[in-house]
Every structure is written in structure tokens, then in C-alpha cells.
Amino acid sequence: MEEQEKNTTGAGKKGLLNNWIVRNLLGAVLLLLLLIWGAKILLNVVTDHGKTIAVPDLAGMSVAEATRTARGEGLRVEVIDSIYVRRMEKGAVYAQNPKAGTQVKKGRRILLTTNAIAAKKVGMPNLVGYSMRQAKAEISSRGLTLGKLIYVEDMATNNVLRQLYRNRQIAAGKLIDSGSAIDLVVGLNPTDNRTYVPDVKDMKYLRALDVIHDNSLNIGKLVFDSSVKDYGDTLSAVVYKQVPAASGAPVLIGSEVTLHLSIDPNKVLITNK
């Protein structure tokens, strides 16, 4: 009796599988699963889904060196502008966008600003009324550099009140050498006057300056050890000590941070930060 029931059940299953409607439905479900699986694999291959690369620090490199370094990381470079820095090697990379350390996808284009062969003149932008971060971005886009942040009491913290060149107020439109340092007089509200000291240890020179300024702080002193011989070394120098250190305790906006830098591998950890 049990054997007969087993035979009946087996025959029923075989009969069900022999039904063309059932077979087509099963085939369609299987095909759909295969398509979904294949599409997921293709998407991951094409877009490198979830995979990012840290942008290397190309400052101070020749364009050829920067190209090789970027290519080794699966990235591309394009020179879009140049400024003139007297102490810097001609043709060397001065700035890059995105910044070093930024997480990007493979194949991303890195825009480079190089040191020109001869100085060129640029028009001073009107930064009054900008936020400090907006002004900093505009200064960089014009091929100028941010100097000192001078804070004065005002209702709006980090609102640009005046722009200075060589300790004198400079009008918008005035032509000055590219690479010139622009000091900003910015507001400071007594109720909104605190920031934090970032950790810039193991960062290269320009990257460390950028991060310090982004946190509404000033550079106190730059102390280069004996391993730093020229401006090329300066750009490659890495912070091995900062005063004050990053502690998480709030400090007054506009405070100074002193950086000690070196290219001595016994002192510093050379990274792409």
C-alpha cells in the first residue's frame, strides 16, 4: 500500500513537470534570476560599485610624474591653469582638485594648477560679504593664496569685512601677481567664536595649511628641519609635530597652530594625505 502511494506521488510530480505551462513558468523564473544576477555583476564591473580611491598628493611633482602617479591609481590628470611662484620649480604641480585624500571612483579626472614659467597678473576679486570658505575658494580659483585671517568683533562669524594685500586694503579689479597672499579681515561673533584644532600630522605642507584654514585657524610658525633644502622639499615636507595638538577641546577662532615639517623618513610617515 505504501509503495503504491509512493508510486502515485512520483507519477504526480513527473506529470506536473511534464506540463508545458509549469515548465515554461519555471524556465521564466530561472531566466529572470539569471538576468538579475548578471545585471548585478555587470553593474559592479562597470561602475566599480562601492569602490573608491584616495586621491594621491601630487603637489610639487612634474606633470609627467603626476600623470604616472595618478595612472597608477586608476585616475587621470588634466592641467587647467597655472600661477607663478618664484621659489617653486617651473612646471611643477602647485594645486589639485579634488584635494589629496578625497575618496573618488576609479577613472576620475584630477584637475591640476601648475607653476608658470613667468609671473602673470590676475585681477583681485571682490571678497567683501563672502563667507570665509567662499572667499578662500575664490582666492584659489584666481591663482592667489590665502594669507592671514584677522578676526574682529562683528555680528556674523567668518563674514569677510575687508581684503588686504601687503597690509593694505586692495580694491577689486586691481592687477597683482598670481600666487600673491591675500589677508582677510573677517567677523567674529562673541557667541560663536569657538572651533577645534584638526589633526594634520602626516599631512603634506599645502594640505595641512588648507585644513588649518578650513577650521578658521591661522598658521603660527612653519618650522622646517634641516632635511628641507629648497621649495620643492617644502612642498614635499610632512608635518611630524603640531602645537597645539588635536585634543578635541574647543579653542578661540583665529588661534594659531605651529607646524613642524620634515622630509626625513625617520621622522615622518610619508602618505598621500
Image: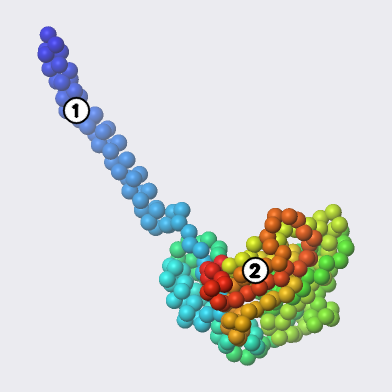
Q: Is residue 108 left or right of residue 156?
A: left
Q: Is residue 67 visible?
A: yes
Seen from the viewer's position, the closer of residues 63 and 149 is 149
Placement of the N terminus among the 4 image quadrants: top left
Residue beneath label 1, please? 17
Residue beneath label 2, please? 241
Image height of 155 relative to 96, above or below = above
For image coordinates 57% across by 88% down, the residue present is 90
Placement of the C terminus among the 4 image quadrants: bottom right
Type of amino acid at the residue the image marks with label 2: Lys
Image height of 220 relative to 49, above or below = below
Q: Position of residue 155 (x, y in %)?
A: 87, 59
Q: Is residue 224 left or right of residue 107?
A: right
For image coordinates 56% across by 80% down, the residue present is 60
Image height of 234 relative to 54, above or below = below
Q: Is residue 128 visible?
A: no
**Circle 2/circle 1 CB separation < 8 Å:** no
Secondary structure beneath dot 2 equals: strand
- Tally the marks: 2
For image coordinates 75% across by 58% down, the residue present is 195
On residue 218, the disc is none
Image height of 119 relative to 200, above or below = below
Work out whether mark 2 precedes mark 1 in sequence or the reverse, and give the earlier one.
Answer: 1
> Which label lies toward us, 2 or 1?
2
Seen from the viewer's position, the closer of residues 15 and 238 is 238
For image coordinates 67% across by 67% down, the residue present is 242
Type of amino acid at the residue the image marks with label 1: Leu
Q: Position of residue 83 (x, y in %)?
A: 63, 83
Secondary structure beneath dot 1 equals: helix
